[in-house]
């Protein structure tokens, strides 16, 4: 690798380390919350389970029901992106952009990405979806904008700045 490329990689490693350092504690707590909400035995601490010496450890998960209720409310009032013009002359352009974004949301099934991100945001505080570009077909140079769900929100790190 050239010296310039090595400097870029070194800088990227430095930024990633800073991001992990800043976000690590909150990400671990969010992961713990998600496990508590969805895991069947995630609501028992390991030391308490050991003290019970093989006795049943029943779990009455009331959290999952509340999460489902909140997600259901969000599905009834779906979030939408709306562009707002600053001046009167921008209003027509803002309506055009809003229509284009709505079309992108509909063609890329953005509702699924929103639902997935919202579920993790409700249970752990971290919900992510991605906006990507992809070729419309393998023989074309035309690209389409798509909303894609972030499969594992804990594999994304945020810029601490």
Image (cartoon, rainbow, N blue to C red):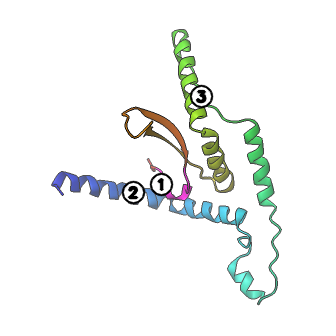
Image spot of residue 89 (x, y percent): 52, 9
Instruction: Give residue 133's mark.
Output: none
Q: Which of marks 3 and 2 is in front?
A: 3
Residue that mark 1 sits on: 157
Residue that mark 3 sits on: 102
Residue that mark 2 sits on: 16
Residue range of the region highlighted in magenta in the rendering: 150-158
Whether the residues at callouts 2 and 1 have beta carbons within 8 Å, the answer is yes
Q: Disc 1 to disc 3, how far (Cα)?
A: 28 Å
Q: Which of marks 1 and 3 is in front?
A: 3
Residue sticking out furthest to the top: 89
The answer to whether 49 appears left or right of 114 in the picture is right
Is residue 85 visible in the rendered structure shown here?
no
The answer to whether 15 appears left or right of 79 in the picture is left
Residue sticking out furthest to the bottom: 53
Find numbered disc 3 in the image and state the secondary structure of the residue it sits on: helix
Answer with mark 1 or mark 3, whichever residue precedes in sequence. Answer: 3
Within 10 Å of disc 2 (Cα), the crowding (few <14, some 14-19, many 20+) is: some
The answer to whether 57 appears left or right of 134 in the picture is right
Answer with mark 3 or mark 2, whichever residue precedes in sequence. Answer: 2
Front residue (pair 100, 134): 134
Picture residue at 74% right of the left edge, 47% below the top: 71
Picture residue at 26% right of the left edge, 52% below the top: 8
Residue 111 vertical placement versus 85 (above, below):
below
């Amino acid at each position: 690798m050239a010296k310039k490329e090595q400097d870029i990689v070194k800088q990227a490693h430095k930024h990633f380390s800073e991001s992990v350092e800043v976000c690590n504690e909150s990400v671990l707590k969010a992961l713990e919350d998600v496990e508590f909400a969805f895991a069947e035995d995630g609501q028992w601490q390991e030391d308490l389970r050991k003290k019970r010496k093989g006795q049943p450890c029943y779990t009455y998960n009331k959290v999952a029901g509340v999460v489902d209720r909140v997600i259901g409310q969000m599905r009834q009032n779906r979030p939408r992106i709306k562009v707002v013009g600053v001046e009167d002359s921008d209003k027509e352009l803002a309506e055009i952009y809003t229509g284009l974004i709505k079309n992108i949301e509909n063609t890329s099934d953005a509702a699924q990405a929103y639902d997935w991100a919202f579920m993790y945001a409700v249970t752990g505080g971290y919900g992510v979806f991605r906006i990507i570009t992809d070729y419309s077909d393998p023989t074309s140079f035309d690209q389409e904008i798509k909303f894609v769900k972030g499969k594992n929100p804990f594999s994304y790190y945020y810029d601490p700045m």
